[in-house]
């Protein structure tokens, strides 16, 4: 496995020049613009290739429903909402 453009690349059943590998990387980056490519496995099958790829996981912010609002953190609550959150009864 070799590292090309910060992507772990593996070519199976043959050889491929770096220029063609970079073209496949660019194709996937264009097809999935919101993802970051982690690894690419290229399986050569005659005149065709099979691409098997993985992306880095996306981070996410935990959202909770508190006092009728969907929030990630309580830091944007005004004083009244902060007091309401403090006084609420939590159900198990």
Image: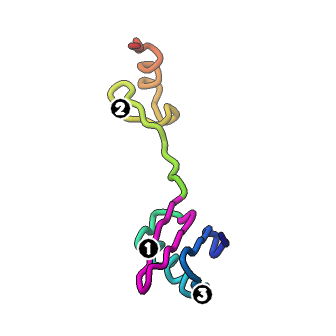
**Secondary structure type for disc 1:** strand
Q: Which residue is mark 1?
A: 50
Q: Position of residue 35 (x, y in %)?
A: 48, 63
Q: Quadrant of the N terminus?
A: bottom right
Q: Position of residue 36 (x, y in %)?
A: 53, 64
Tag 3–tag 2 contact (CB < 8 Å): no
Q: Residue at 49%, 65% (x, y): give it.
A: 53
Q: Is residue 24 magenta?
A: no
**Secondary structure type for disc 3:** loop
Q: Residues within 10 Å of mark 2 (few under 14, many from 20)?
A: few
Q: Which residue is mark 2?
A: 69
- Residue range corresponding to the magenta coloring: 37-55
Q: Which residue is mark 3?
A: 17
Disc 2 from disc 1: Cα separation: 46 Å
* Nearer-N-terminus badge (3/2): 3
Tag 1–tag 3 contact (CB < 8 Å): no
Q: Quadrant of the C terminus?
A: top left
Q: Residues within 10 Å of mark 1 (few under 14, many from 20)?
A: few
Q: Is residue 71 above or below residue 24?
A: above
Q: Position of residue 43 (x, y in %)?
A: 49, 74
């Amino acid at each position: 496995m070799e590292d090309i453009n910060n992507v772990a690349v593996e070519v199976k059943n043959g050889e491929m020049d770096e220029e063609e590998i970079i073209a496949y990387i660019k194709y996937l980056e264009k097809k999935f613009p919101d993802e970051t490519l982690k690894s690419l496995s290229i399986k050569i099958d005659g005149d065709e290739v099979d691409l098997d790829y993985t992306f880095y996981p996306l981070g996410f912010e935990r959202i909770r429903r508190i006092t009728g609002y969907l929030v990630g953190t309580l830091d944007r609550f005004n004083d009244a909402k902060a007091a309401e959150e403090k006084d609420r009864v939590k159900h198990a």
